[in-house]
Image: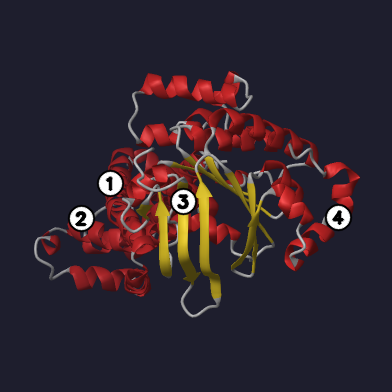
Amino acid sequence: MNTSPHHGAAIEFRNVSFHVDGSRELLQALNLEVRRGETLVLLGRSGSGKTTTLKLINHLVAPTSGQLFVDGKSTDEWDVIRLRRMIGYVIQEVGLFPHFTVARNIGLVPQIEEWPADRIRQRVQELLQLVGLDGQLASRYPRQLSGGQRQRVGVARALAADPPILLMDEPFGALDPITRAELQREFLTLQKRLQKTVVFVTHDLREALLLGTRIALMEAGRLVTVLTPEEFFHSTEPLVAAYVDAFGTELNGGGKRGLS
Amino acid sequence: MNVWQFMLQNHAEVAELTLEHLWLVGVSTLLAVLVGIPLGILITRWPALNKPILGSANIIQTIPSLALFGFLLPAPWIGERADRLAILALTLYALLPLIRNTYTGIKGVDPAVVEAGRGMGMTDRQLLFQVELPLALGVIIAGVRVAAVISVGLATIAAAIGAGGLGEYIFRGLAMVNNQVILAGAIPAALLAILADISLGWLEKRLSPG
C-alpha cells in the first residue's frame, strides 16, 4: 500500500480520545505516529489504554473525538471491512475458531476474500512453513495443538492475505517462558524478512525492549512518551524509570539485549 | 385382555395413530425451527426486541393447551381443520425453547472469538453463519430437543379437538374407563418422547464443538 500522500506514517493518531458512555476516559488526546515497517510496542499496565489504542486502529472501537489515519485516510472514510482485511490481527490464543481446522483458520481471510480454493491451500502450506509448523497440522483442530503451536497458527492467520499492517495484542502472553522466548526470536527473524508495520501490545518490558523499534509507554489512558529501546532503558523520565526499576533485577539478570 | 394383546389386535390402528402423532409433532417442530431460530437471531441483533419477543413466547407457554386450541378455533383457514389447528398450537408452544436457546447459544459464544473474526474483517453475515451459528448449534439443538419432547406430550391433547394422534386412545380409554385403552395410547407416546430425546441428544453431542 503505497497510495498514501503522507510522509512515512502508516498510522497516525491526532488528538484521539475514547470513552464509553458515562465512564472515565479510557484514552485521552492521543497523538502518535506509527512509521512504515517499524514495530511500535505499546507498553503499559492493565487499563492503561494499550488494547483500546489497538482496537481503534482496526475500528473495533471508534474514537469519541479526534481523528485516526490509516494509510493517510481517516478511519471514518475507510470501508471498515476493507480496512480490517488489510490489517492482520493477532490476539491471545483464544481468538482461533475452535470449530475450524488449522487450515481453515489460517485461510480465513483468503476465504472471505474469495480466493480460489487451491490458491488458499497453497497459501496455507506456505504460511505453516513460514511460522515453523509441520504441514501435517493443517487438518488438526486448535484444541489438539500446544499453546505455542496455537499462537503460531494465530500469527499465520494474521499474515494470510499479506496485510501491510499487523496488530498484535499480547500474542505471547499466555505461553510458558521458553516457548515465549522462542516465538519472540522467530518474530524478529520474520519481521526482518517481511517488514510489516507492526503495533504490538505488551506489559512486559523485556519483550518491549527485545521486539520494539520504538516503545510507547502508556499510563492511565495517556501516552507518556515514545522512545527507542536504548533511550527507554536510560531515560530519566520518572514513569519510564519506575517501569525499568520494576523490571530491574530481571533485566540485569541477563535480559539487557545487545541494542545494535 | 391386557394392553399388549389389545395393541397387537389393533396394530393397524396403533400404527396409524402413531404416524398421525409423529406428523403433528414433526410438522409443528419443523415450523417452530423455521420461525424460532430466525427470531432468536433477530433478538441478538436488536436487543430492543428481546423483551417483547421472549415475553410473548413466555406468555403463550402459560396458556393451557385446551384453552389455546379453543382460542385458535375462530381463526380463518386454520380453524377449518383440526390438524391445522393442532399444528399451529404445538408450533406456538415449541417457539419458546427455540427462541431462547438460539439467543443464549449465540450470546454464549466466546466474545474473544467473535471479536477476532470481526477484527479480521468478517461481515456480520459471515460471522453469523461461519462462527456464531456453528458454535451455538449444540445449544440450539438442545432447544429443538426440549421442543420436540414437549410436543409429543402436548400432541395427545390434540385428540380432544379431533386432530387424531395417540391421544385418541387416551380420551377413548378415559370415556370407557378402560386402562388398557389408555395405556395403548400412553405407552407409544412415551416411547416416542424417549426416542426423540435420545436421538436429538445424540445429535446435540455430535454437533457441539469442542
Query: What residue is shown with label 3?
Result: A11
In-image side of A99 versus A235 (left or right): left
Q: Quadrant of residue B60?
A: bottom left
Q: Position of residue A153 (x, y in %)?
A: 58, 33
Helix, strand or loop under label 1: helix
Marks 4 and 3 sit apart, C-alpha to C-alpha, by 32 Å
Q: Residues within 10 Å of mark 1 (few under 14, many from 20)?
A: some
Marks 2 and 1 sit apart, C-alpha to C-alpha, by 10 Å
Q: Residues within 10 Å of mark 2 (few under 14, many from 20)?
A: many
Looking at the image, which is closer to me, A129 or B49? A129
Q: Position of residue A220 (x, y in %)?
A: 63, 70
When the figure is inspected, residue A138 is found, relative to residue A152, above or below; the finding is above
Residues at marks 2 and 4 on the same chain: no
Q: Residues within 10 Å of mark 4 (few under 14, many from 20)?
A: some
**Residue A248: numbered disc:** 4
Query: What residue is shown with label 2?
Result: B83
Q: Chain of mark 2?
A: B
Give the mark toward the camera: 3 or 2: 3
Q: Residues within 10 Å of mark 3 (few under 14, many from 20)?
A: many
Identity of the residue furthest to the bottom in this view: A22
Mark 4 or mark 3, earlier in chain: 3
When the figure is inspected, residue B31 is found, relative to residue A194, above or below; the finding is below
Residues at marks 3 and 1 on the same chain: no
Mark 2 is on which residue type? Answer: Asp
